[in-house]
Image (cartoon, grey):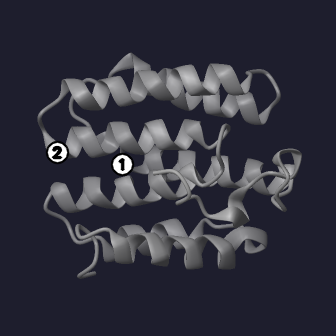
Amino acid sequence: MPGMRDKRFIAEHRGGHLKKEQQYQLIKWACGCAEHVLRLFGEKIDARLVNALDVAKEWKQGKASVGDARKASVGAHAVAREYSNPVSIAVARAVGHAVATAHMADHSLGAAIYALKAVRSAGKPIDAERKWQNARLPPEIKALVLDARSKKEKLSKDLRTQ
């Protein structure tokens, strides 16, 4: 939705206040959230999901472009559309948002939230997963992420109760 982006996540080179190092921290954290639930996808992990996570890591190292990350994100979201299992869909969306963090840093929140949805769809409580995610947030971005995620979760009827 246009106008719904959290301005605190706009990178300096786009006129915002987010430093490049913070965006690197966000993509690393987002990939960690997605990788942590990847096992829930199913017996065989779609190669596009593995590729997307690899591209995200390459972007952080300066070995992949934002365009590469966007293409990998589109691939991960295509995986989500090809499945009917809500757990697999949520895992694929988590991966898609993780790599999209290279393009727009607030996609990192989507990775975390979809990881929680994957856990919930798998019939497990999300509190432990949320604590796991929070424990991996670097101190420099922790307050920003926790505040922004809390606001997003209030809008998400799927996660409102926990």
Q: Give the CA separation, mark 1 to mark 2.
A: 13 Å
Indicate the secondary structure of the residue bearing disc 1.
Answer: helix
Q: Give 64 or 54, whichever is nearer the viewer.
A: 64
Instruction: Indicate left or right for 46 with 111 as reference.
Output: left
Q: Is 131 rendered above or below residue 35?
A: below
Res 44 quadrant in image:
top left
Res 157 quadrant in image:
bottom left
Q: Is 43 rendered above or below residue 135?
A: above
Mark yes or no: residue 45 visible: no
**Residue 46 at x, y = what percent?**
33, 21
User: Where's the C terminus, which quadrant?
Assistant: bottom left
**Residue 150 at x, y = what percent?**
47, 78
In the rendered structure, are the residues bearing label 1 and label 2 in contact, judged by CB atoms less than 8 Å apart?
Answer: no
Mark yes or no: residue 63 visible: yes
Instruction: Indicate left or right for 2 with 119 as reference.
Output: right
Amino acid bearing label 1: Val
Q: Give 94 or 126, whichever is nearer the viewer.
A: 94
**Dot 1 crowding, Cα within 10 Å, few <14, some 14–19, many 20+:** many
Indicate the secondary structure of the residue bearing disc 2.
Answer: helix
Instruction: Indicate left or right for 24 with 103 as reference.
Output: right
Please give the residue where the numbered disc 1 appears in the rendered image: 37
Viewer-nearest of discs 1 and 2: 2
**Residue 27 at x, y = what percent?**
65, 47
Tell me the number on the disc at residue 158.
Answer: none
Residue at screen point 21% across, 23% down: 82
Residue at screen point 82% across, 46% down: 14
Res 120 quadrant in image:
bottom left
Please give the residue where the numbered disc 2 appears in the rendered image: 86
Q: Is 146 rendered above or below residue 60?
A: below
Q: Is 104 rendered above or below residue 144?
A: above
Amino acid bearing label 2: Pro
**Residue 18 at x, y = what percent?**
81, 59
